[in-house]
Image (cartoon, rainbow, N blue to C red):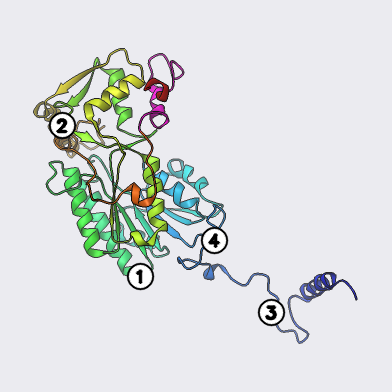
Amino acid sequence: GGNPAAAAVEAVRQHLAAGGRDAAGRADCSNKVFTRDASTLPVTYKHRGTGGRSSISGITSTVFGSTGFLGRYVVNHIAKTGSRMILPTRCNENARQHLKVMGDLGQIVQMDYTIRDRDRVKYAVERSNVVVNVVGREWETRNFSFEDVHVTFPTMLAEICKEVGTVERLIHVSALGASASNPSAYYQTKAAGDAAVRAIFPAATIVKPAKLVGTEDVFLNRFAEHTNKFPYAPVIDDGGSRLQPVFVDDVGLGIQALVLDETTAGKDYELCGEKVYSMEELVKLTQKIIRASNTGVFYVPAPLARLPARLHEYLLHRIPFPLPTPTGLTHAYIDAQQVDYLKGKNTLGFKELGIVPAKLQGVVIDYLRAHRFGGYDVGSTAGQELK
């Protein structure tokens, strides 16, 4: 009538003392504590943990463009569900070290690559069941054209995802307004990339976010910088182009929802803010938040704005060193101001994902206080300022 628990513990101790072998000296696997090695850990949707940061979601996701403005939010939201993350980047360790803490210990794997190296791209993809492409550029450089970034790479990536056979979900991030009829080369190439991805990998989910705003944006921050530097903040033509800016973290949350919901495969989603603004209204809103003393707007006719843009693009490929590219000094940006960027009436969006996007006014754009005349702590918060 001894204690059964004590007897069991003693039996295990004796077994370990014998080197894990039975009386005949053979390896005994009947009482192994760990029944799986690393090769049998779940990598499909059939095996899911509790969903927390330290669980195993069953998702191994490769995210291209992880160090970009949107990419870091995408990594954060997917990683904290207990997913393994493979993050190919072309930067040094200092520029990507912030991504390491977004997942549990050992779950964030970083590697070097270039979008022109097919073998490295395949190496990054063949271990994953989810691939997210957030690679994009709003202006061309001497090394990468819109065609390289928005068409050639997505086409190659879709081909590889189809070829390796392990990829169940491909999330391709495009842009609201992507169309062959858009006057801007940026949106034209985005549309061409979307068509190529859809043709090669029909189950791909294409995400079209509106103009992104957030702490690291090159949108409202640029309006604030122009207000601080110049007597008048420049806008193209009459600043009448309408758009629905969206908080970048909401888009990251939306992409996480798409990854976790397999029924979203093969569909397009337009992720936009709820309120419509004109470019002029956004400039004046920014000036109000930063409490600018000079609140004027300078309306630059598009033909006049194209003159320095033409010179910049002429020199871009003719000098042996990189040129700075101020926002607004490219044909793609100037041409984009000729049309509106609004969500379609019958298109899928945040509502279908169960997400209510944050309002632009208030805490979402409170980061603009860093540009305030007199210092960050001068005046009230953005939410109080806009009441």
Q: How far apart are labels 1 and 4 at the CA level?
A: 24 Å
Residue 225: image x %, image y %? 31, 23
Residue holding disc 1: 165
Give the residue type at disc 3.
Ser
Residue 66 shown left or right of residue 335 in the figure: right
In this picture, is 297 found above or below 239?
above
Q: Nearer the viewer, residue 348 or 24?
A: 348
Q: How far apart are labels 2 and 4 at the CA level?
A: 53 Å
| Image quadrant where one finds the N terminus | bottom right
Q: How far apart are labels 3 and 4 at the CA level?
A: 25 Å
Mark on residue 87? none
Residue holding disc 2: 309
Residue holding disc 4: 49
**Is 150 within the magenta?**
no
Residue holding disc 3: 30
Give the residue type at disc 2.
Ala
Q: Are marks 1 and 2 in contact (CB under 8 Å)?
A: no
